[in-house]
Image (cartoon, helix red, strand yellow):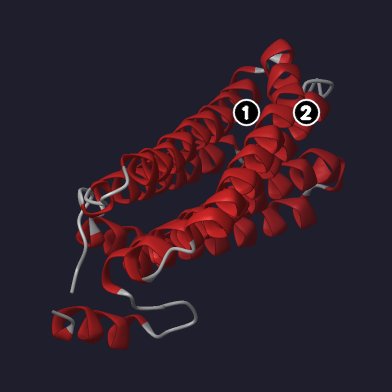
Amino acid sequence: MDITSNTHSQHISRQFNQELEELKTHLMAMGGLVEKQVQDAVHALLEGDTRLAEKVRDNDRQVNELQLQIDDECTRVLARRQPAASDLRLVLAVIRATSDLERIGDEASKIARNALLLSENTSTVRGLIEVRHISEHVRKMLRDALTAFARFDTELAMQVVHEDELVDDEYGSAMRSLMTFMMEDSRAISSVLSIMWVLRALERVGDHANNLAEYVVYLVKGLDIRHSDLGSVDQKMLKKP
């Protein structure tokens, strides 16, 4: 049976209800922070804003602290409440999600560090158009994945899963273009390599957003769709009541 966002507020123990709601609330707060980190890191790169890039790099500590806090809360719920069924799936999904959000924070920090490196480059940087395009795509994936988690929306989650393939294609195309440009102009190797690292970080953000969406399906449907063919996943989603 599918669960809804209200399922975890129907326990006899009001304290248990509150603990589960706090897990979701704190996860969304962490999600909002890393979403802002990615947005600011990309903006810093595109606009050459070194101060913002340094802020993103320094704020990574906050992301790490939130992960530790939420993991500790999950551990206490597991120890005290010994949750079962959908409650257990929620706690496990939150634990997995915080790990992916922390890694998204790491990718934002990498983008910020490359923004600082590129700020020292006086020549025109190639690949910024690709960075802007792919960043908009993966940021939408991340936003939708977090919304799907907050609303227990498997339809939106599956949209994110399908979008990940498009991001992979865009990433591959951008990398091939930059490789060609680098071979034609050896003077641009340093700056192009930095842009390639940024694109790699953005592609990884998309992968982690995809993971978040998969956890929503696991949470609501009880289906583990990791490492599964999308065609078979779509069929399972149709069959699952």
Q: Which mark is residue 118?
A: 2
Rendered view: 207 above or below 44 = below
Residue 188 appearing in the image = yes
Quadrant where the N terminus sits is bottom left
Identify which residue is drawn at 46% across, 60% down: 93
Rendered view: 230 above or below 69 = below
Residue 124 appearing in the image = no
177 or 15, nearer to the observer: 15
Per the image, the residue denoted by label 1 is 41
Other-residue count near label 2 (Cα within 10 Å), few / some / many at <14 / 14–19 / ≥20: many
Identify which residue is drawn at 36% across, 40% down: 21
Judge left or right: residue 55 versus residue 36: right
Other-residue count near label 1 (Cα within 10 Å), few / some / many at <14 / 14–19 / ≥20: many
Q: Position of residue 7 (x, y in %)?
A: 22, 54
Amino acid type at mark 2: Leu
Q: Position of residue 3 (x, y in %)?
A: 21, 62
Per the model, the C-alpha gap separating discs 2 and 1 is: 13 Å
101 or 178, nearer to the observer: 101
